Every structure is written in structure tokens, then in C-alpha cells.
Image (cartoon, rainbow, N blue to C red):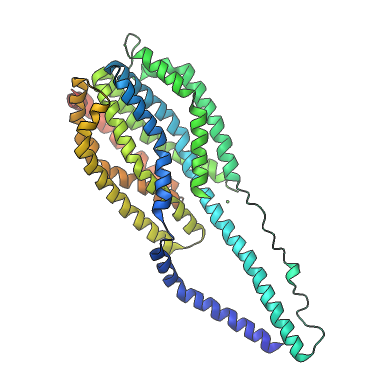
Amino acid sequence: MGSLNDFLVSDSVAASRTQRMEWPFAFSSMMQGGKMNFPSIALPAALALLADPIASLVDTAFIGRIGPVELAAVGVSIAVFNQVSRVAIFPLVSITTSFVAEEDASSKIDDELIIGGVKHHSELNELVLHDDTIKGANNSSFTGVSTNSVNTKIERKHIPSVSTALVIGGILGILQAIFLVFTARPILNFMGVKNDSPMLTPARQYLTLRSLGAPAVLLSLAMQGVFRGFKDTKTPLYATGSLLLARVIAVTFCITLSASMAARLGSIPMAAFQICLQVWLTSSLLADGLAVAGQTILASAFAQRDFLKAVSAASRVLQWGFILGLFLCAVLGSSLQFVSRLFTNDAGVLHVINIGIPFVVLTQPINALAFVFDGVNFGASDFAYSAYSLVMVAIVSILCLVFLSSNYGFIEYGWR
């Protein structure tokens, strides 16, 4: 039996060395064969992410036909709703995506190890039985090895982060609806819509009605996070959520502050700001589909310790993000002046929109790369860097807004 043991050990070592030597070439073949398929992940994710911005665009288009006052009121309400929603949505969805992807990849590795162990024991037993037959032996020193002793049953996957995300999403949605319904007036007053403003009544009505759908929105987006991904992950879900919470507050506060400044200038600047903002957000979120694809693939690669795949995925998704940004820049630059007429016929609003078109167009490549970099950081579970960097950028942006508007009248000059 000594020769048989030596044969098995040497064969195992040789197979391991062969696998290590062929691994880089196998990865290259996988890349060329399209197994790391970004479009198949990015396109459905982008379409799902666009649902809410498209709904806001439809609202903007229909209400813009009523008048600039109503359009401005809806703009303030949407800014408030998005601010409150994203505080809850973004940390929940992003963390769920990464952790579910990591857990799914880890469980696949465990399943492969179990199946591989069963196959190894089965082949080993056959070799031993064949050797015993040749020697005419009735018993073998390997009689303790049996394929029946290995339990091949693979249980249904249990992913704690899924149930945790859904429960938290439902609770946050209900709390958000209650908060917005009962505090609509003071929030709108804080945004610059005074009690004697004609925008107050339609803004309050829109915000109250839209807030009733908050629980459904949060639950659906939590499910998006689950399906984007597929460890116990409850503790990191809570821990890293605080980092992303700070990040989202920093990002959305810049938009909310801009909306508040536009609202203080009057209904026409606010209406133009709302149209430009919705077009900017909708086009920018197309890049979030690529970010989701990169995040999912990177999370799986890191869980499998496949660092070459992680580097290749990050490089590829960043390249595609920049190309997408240039494409959006060209499309919006050539069409936004005409598309804006779908939202309003008011000459004053259209004039202000034309002033804001260069900003909307030229920032598209930057926006696309920013979204994709978020996906790369989230896929690597580097939530701390993403949070700290965005907070610093937000602080600089807010200081610039306040300084320019208060000292040089830059904001007012631009919108008038």
C-alpha cells in the first residue's frame, strides 16, 4: 500500500501545481469568453435604478404644462423627498449588494469543496478496491473510507443580510412616510417656501401624497440590493451603514441646498432648476448600472480571493464608465435645448434652462466616473474611504455655494 499512497500524494501535488500554472491563462480565456459580462448585469440594474427618476421626469413634464408655480412647487417637494429617501436607501442597498454577493460567492466555494471531497473519496476508494483485488486481500487499510460516510446533502442557503435588509427597509419606509406627512409645512418653510408663497399649497400636497409610497419604494430598492448581489452579516450591515449614511447626507445636502437657493429666487428659477436637475440625475444614474455590475463582480472576486479578476474588473468598468459619460455628454449637448420644451412652454423658464445646459452637459463624464468609482469602492467593501472622501468634497462644494452666493451674487446672477 506504500506505493499507492506515494502515487496519490504525488498525483495530488502535480495536479495542484498544474492548476496554479494554468490559472492566469484560464482567467484570460474567461475574460475573452465573456464570462465576466458587465452588460448583462449593468443594463438590468440601470433600468431598475431609472424607475424613480423617470417617474419624477413624468411628473415634471405633466406639471410643467400647468404652470411655472406648480412646477417650482414640485421641484422643491422632490428635492425634499429625495433627500429624506436617499438617507435611508443608499446605505441599505449598497451594503446589501456587497454582502449578499460575498456570501453567495463564499457559499459556492464551500459547496465546491464538499462536492470535491466526495469525488476524491470515491475515486480513492475505487483505487484501493482495485489494488486489493490484485493482491487478493479481503480487507484493506482504507476500509474506513466510504462514500457513504460523506454527507453530500447541500442545505438551502441562509443569507441573514437579506431578511435584515427587508425588515429595516420596511420600518424605515413607514417612518419616512409618517415624518413627511406631519412635517411637510415646516420643512417647506425651511427650504425657502414661505407661508404666503403660491408654491406652498401645491408643494405640500405633492409631498404628502408622494410620501405615502415611501414604504413600497424602500422595500423594492432593498430587494434590488438583494438581487444585485447573491456572511452572518448583521453586524457589518449596521456598522458600515453609519459610514454610508454620512456619505449620502453629504451628497444630497448639496443638492438640497442648491434647490433651497433656487427656491428663494422665485418660481421661474426654481422651475428651471427642477428640470435641469431631473435631466442631470436621470442621465447620471445610467452610469449606476455599470457601478452595480462592477460592485457585484468585485465583491465576488474578493470573496474568492481572485485579485487578478478584481483588478481587471475595476479597470474595465472604469473605462466603460468614461465612455458612457462622453456619450451622454454628446447626446445631451445636442438635444437638451429641444427636450426642455417637453417640460414647459414658459419663455422665462426656457431662458434659464439654456443658461444651465453647459453645466448639465459638461459634468456627465465626471458624474459617470464618480458613480463607477462608488461601485468599485463598495465592491471592495471600502466604505470608509467612500464616505470620508465624499464628505470632504461636499464640504468644499457647500462652502463654495455659500461664499459665492453671499459675496458675489453668483447664484442669483446665474439663474437670472
Residue 409 in view? no
In the picture, measured across the screen, residue 406 lies left or right of residue 198, that is: left
Q: Examine the image and state in which quarter residue 307 appears.
A: bottom left
Q: Nearer the viewer, residue 194 or 371?
A: 371
Q: Position of residue 67 (x, y in %)?
A: 28, 17
Residue extending furthest toward the bottom: 135
Seen in the picture, residue 38 relative to 2 is either above or below; the reply is above
In the picture, measured across the screen, residue 128 lies left or right of residue 292, that is: right
Residue 25 in view? yes
Q: Position of residue 416 (x, y in %)?
A: 18, 22
Q: Position of residue 86 (x, y in %)?
A: 43, 33
Instruction: Give the residue displayed 37% in from the left and 35% down from the top.
Output: 250
Q: Nearer the viewer, residue 197 or 357?
A: 357
Residue extending furthest toward the right: 138
Q: Examine the image and state in which quarter residue 190 appears.
A: top left
Seen in the picture, residue 145 relative to 220 is either above or below; the reply is below
Q: Position of residue 375 (x, y in %)?
A: 40, 48
Instruction: Give the residue displayed 43% in from the left and 50% down from the top.
Output: 41
Seen in the picture, residue 319 relative to 85 is either above or below; the reply is below
Residue extending furthest toward the top: 196
Instruction: Give the residue displayed 32% in from the left and 50% down from the top.
Output: 321
Instruction: Give the residue displayed 22% in from the left and 43% down from the top.
Output: 330
Check the picture and name the quadrant holding the N terminus: bottom right
Image mark count: 0
In the picture, measured across the screen, residue 252 lies left or right of residue 299, that is: left
